Image: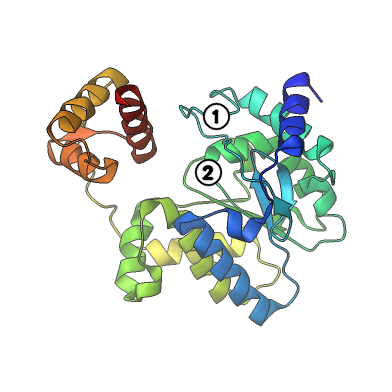
């Protein structure tokens, strides 16, 4: 375990902030959908174990008590642990899993297990990749590793259900309010739909891939918006000007205005820049 990981774990351990159950610590649409999926599968399938892939703690049970933290494998974030370098992110993951209070890994988690379903972004998959490949080799059938993600990861091709924009249209066409939501929750929403409908258990990548293709069959992807991308300085200048006019302007309304003008910016990036501009003005 390198010094950087050791220092981080020491900081977490020494924090005076009260620990919370992981179920209560995380938020957002993605996590809400994961908890709903867990509840439904427990009712129909019985023995389901939910774990969290955490950039702050490594692999932990959803029932573990964790101290609040700020760390992510996502790039271009002030609290990113990987700084867009996949090799460093996997080193960080391995260090967390080996150095925590209860050492764990996906590979050890799969000892005696029938299958594994992972719902994560490509950055998190890259961080976990060596561990994921070992976990797949540990399963009685490698086909019982199923990964839902919005991006391609070549090494996981046989396990991957790559969720694309077509499913947004397909799920809306189903007509159920429970399937409506944002793009950020798309992979979890798709996983919930397919896993709750499949008759094959443990689920396999082959069966769920076929189910996914049936779901999006004949569906054209939503029309891509032709928005112009800008550097951080341009976006920050827009935010600063808007705050001059209205110091209480929130980032969501400003992002909506920015995009309505034909400009592009990721939600998380815009929110970060908005916070930085406000901090400089205080």
Check the image and report above or below for 35 versus 282.
below
Residue at the spot 20% in from the left edge and 35% down from the top edge: 247
Task: Label 2, secondary structure: give it.
Answer: loop
Residue at the spot 22% in from the left edge and 40% down from the top edge: 248
How far apart are the two marked residues, 1 and 2, measured between alpha carbons?
A: 14 Å
x, y percent for residue 66: 69, 49
x, y percent for residue 21: 67, 58
Q: Label 2, on which residue?
A: 121
Mark 1 vs mark 2, foreground winner is 1
Name the foreground residue: 212 vs 67.
67
Q: Tell me the quadrant of the picture where the N terminus can be found.
A: top right
The scheme the figure's colours follow is: rainbow
User: Which badge, 1 or 2, is on the more N-terminal residue?
Assistant: 1
x, y percent for residue 58: 71, 41
Check the image and report above or below for 216 versus 249.
below
Q: Label 1, on which residue?
A: 80
x, y percent for residue 53: 66, 47
């Amino acid at each position: 375990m390198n010094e950087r990981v050791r220092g981080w774990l020491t900081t977490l351990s020494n924090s005076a902030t009260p620990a919370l159950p992981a179920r209560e610590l995380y938020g957002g649409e993605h996590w809400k959908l994961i908890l709903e999926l867990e509840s439904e599968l427990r009712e129909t399938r019985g023995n389901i174990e939910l774990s969290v892939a955490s950039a702050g703690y490594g692999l932990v049970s959803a029932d573990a008590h964790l101290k609040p933290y700020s760390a992510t494998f996502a790039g271009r974030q002030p609290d990113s642990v990987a700084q867009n370098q996949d090799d460093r992110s996997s080193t960080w993951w391995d260090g967390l899993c080996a150095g925590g209070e209860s050492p764990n890994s996906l590979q050890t988690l799969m000892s005696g297990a029938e299958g594994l379903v992972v719902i994560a972004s490509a950055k998190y998959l890259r961080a976990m990749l060596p561990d994921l490949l070992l976990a797949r080799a540990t399963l009685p059938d490698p086909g019982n590793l199923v990964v839902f993600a919005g991006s391609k990861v070549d090494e996981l091709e046989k396990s991957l259900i790559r969720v694309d924009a077509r499913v947004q249209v397909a799920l809306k066409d189903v007509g159920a309010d429970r399937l409506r939501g944002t793009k950020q929750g798309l992979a979890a929403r798709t996983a919930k739909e397919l896993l709750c409908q499949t008759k094959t258990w443990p689920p396999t990548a082959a069966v769920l891939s076929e189910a996914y293709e049936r779901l999006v069959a004949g569906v054209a992807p939503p029309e891509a918006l032709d928005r112009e991308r800008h550097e951080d300085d341009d976006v920050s200048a827009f935010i600063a000007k808007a705050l001059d006019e209205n110091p209480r302007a929130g980032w969501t309304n400003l992002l909506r205005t920015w995009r309505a003008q034909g400009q592009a910016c990721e939600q998380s990036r815009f929110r970060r820049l908005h916070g930085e501009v406000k901090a400089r003005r205080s």
